[in-house]
């Protein structure tokens, strides 16, 4: 069975909104777009590249799809990510889009949880959920996430969309690998491990 892997860049206080640029996602008046690059380094880049090696598809929400589809088709061909991002199969969850222009993109039909269950049961490699916070939270609620791959950067943003927002399903996580880069970014891979335990001191 294919794995659904949530790949996300987070600030220390859990914000995932608009890490890549000031105009990436200004929704709700967000003024901190582009916060990731100043607190990143080449070790973070190498880790992210490694996330894509076992994957042969991405699963995107509508907003992330729109951002990527506007950027990657005309991105610098010397960037090693450009060919990879354009050639990978993209599955898109949207209630508003009726057609997709970016190459190798497929619009999921019907209920998104049912569609993702079918994807998990199909032949192929891992499927990375990139950005797409609303979609990721839907997948969490339906117990469809197999792994989290997170970069947690040493910066506090204070406002913005969070991956684990209020109402997230309480979940214990098993650490698969955790390391810290020279810039202080924590690169962590975790797998859901059932419900959290509770105790007192």
Image: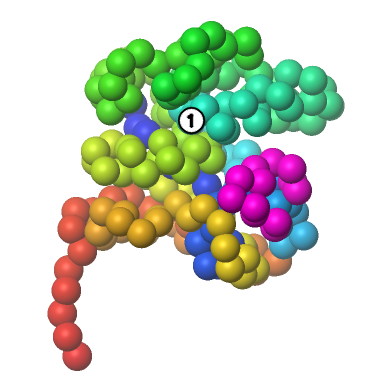
Image-based side of 183 in relation to 170, left or right: right
- Point out the stretch of residues depicted in magenta: 21-32
In the rendered image, residue 161 lying in the magenta stretch gets the answer: no
Q: In this view, does 92 lie above or below 99?
A: below
Return the x and y of residue 92 as percentages of the image width and height.
47, 21
Left or right placement of residue 9 versus residue 171 in this view: right
* Residue visible at 79% across and 20% down in the picture: 74
Residue visible at 71% across and 24% down in the picture: 70
Q: Which residue lies furthest to the bottom in this view?
A: 201
- Secondary element at image label 1: strand
Q: In this view, does 24 lie above or below 40?
A: above
The quadrant holding residue 175 is bottom left
Quarter of the image with the C terminus in it: bottom left
Q: Can residue 36 be seen from the camera position used here? A: no
Instruction: Examine the residues drawn in magenta and state their main secondary structure.
Output: loop
Residue 187 in the image: x percent, y percent? 54, 57
Q: In this view, does 96 lie above or below 198?
A: above
Characterize the local packing of mark 1: few (<14), some (14-19) or many (20 or more) Cα atoms within 10 angstroms: many
* Whether residue 39 is visible: yes
Image coords of residue 200 (percent x, y): 17, 85
Q: Which of the pair 147/130 is nearer the observer?
A: 130
Residue at 42%, 29% in the rendered image: 126
Q: Which of 165 and 125 is in front in this view?
A: 165
| Residue matched to label 1 | 61
Q: Quadrant of residue 118?
A: top left
Q: Which residue is pictured at 53% across the width and 9% down the height?
A: 99
Residue 27, position in %: x, y? 61, 45
What colour scheme was applied to this rendering of the protein? rainbow
For this rendering, which residue is in front, 197 or 100? 100
Looking at the rendered image, the quarter that the N terminus falls into is top left
């Amino acid at each position: 069975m294919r794995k659904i892997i949530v790949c996300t860049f987070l600030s220390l206080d859990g914000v995932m909104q608009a890490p890549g640029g000031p105009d990436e996602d200004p929704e709700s008046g967000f003024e901190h777009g582009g916060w990731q690059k100043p607190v990143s380094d080449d070790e973070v880049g190498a880790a992210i590249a490694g996330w894509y090696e076992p994957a042969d598809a991405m699963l995107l929400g509508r907003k992330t799809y729109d951002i990527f589809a506007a950027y990657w088709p005309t991105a610098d061909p010397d960037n090693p990510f450009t060919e990879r991002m354009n050639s990978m199969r993209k599955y898109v969850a949207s209630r508003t889009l009726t057609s997709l222009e970016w190459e190798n993109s497929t619009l999921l039909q019907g209920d998104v949880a049912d569609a993702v269950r079918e994807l998990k049961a199909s032949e192929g490699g891992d499927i990375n959920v990139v950005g797409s916070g609303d979609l990721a939270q839907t997948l969490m609620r339906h117990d469809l996430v197999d792994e989290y791959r997170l970069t947690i950067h040493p910066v506090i943003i204070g406002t913005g969309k969070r991956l684990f927002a209020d109402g997230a399903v309480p979940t214990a996580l098993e650490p698969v690998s955790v390391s810290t880069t020279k810039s202080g970014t924590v690169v962590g891979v975790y797998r859901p491990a059932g419900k959290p335990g509770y105790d007192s001191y």
